[in-house]
Image (cartoon, rainbow, N blue to C red):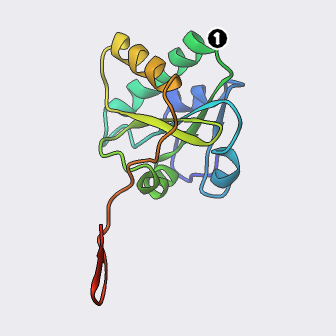
Amino acid sequence: MTESKTVSPLIARLLESPQTFEVTTENFEKTHKMPGVLILFFSEDPVRYKEASDFAVVAGEILRTFSDTHALRLGVLLPEAARLLQPRYGFKRWPAFVLLRDGQYLGAIEGMRSWNKFIDKITRLMNAEPSRPPTIGVTVQQPGNTCH
């Protein structure tokens, strides 16, 4: 693992799964375009965000639940990489899952919810048509021209 801070035991255990790997700023361009369904787990410091540990447990359960029916992989972004790459997907609440199919954005799940709501949302996203991520909007202005 590349991050200098100590990784929570739950995330460390999650990274031991053969379907799971760490996503860094260095390997992101290659790994996010992998074929099949990829769940990116944007983790955060579990001291600052209590739900980060819960998300690690949920991520492992999602892999177990869907691995028989989907070629599913999980990419874990540790907090430093997660913070740097978050603007690409524009979610607002930490931690979050971002789902991709063949490198194309399917949607995001932000914050904790009941297990059934996780399953419903993951199922819907896996069957969704790819779309453009809702990146953070920035107004660009040039003399005589405004773009939103």
Q: Position of residue 38 (x, y in %)?
A: 60, 33
Say if 17 sits above or below 50 in the image.
Answer: above
Q: Give above or below for 6 relative to 124.
A: below
Residue 63 on image: x %, y %: 58, 18
Res 111 quadrant in image: top left
Q: Is residue 7 left or right of residue 142?
A: right
Q: Is residue 100 above or below residue 30?
A: above
Q: What type is the residue that disc 1 sits on? A: Thr
Using the image, determine if residue 50 lies above or below residue 27.
above
Q: Residue at x 38, y 49 (%)?
A: 134
User: Which residue is depicted at the point 47% across and 49% down?
Assistant: 82
SS type, badge 1: loop
Q: Position of residue 105 (x, y in %)?
A: 51, 41
Q: In the current view of this chain or complex, which residue is farthest to the front?
A: 144
How many residues crowd mark 1 within 10 Å: few (<14), some (14–19), many (20+)? Answer: few
Residue where numbered disc 1 is placed: 69
**Left or right of 25 on screen, residue 109:** left
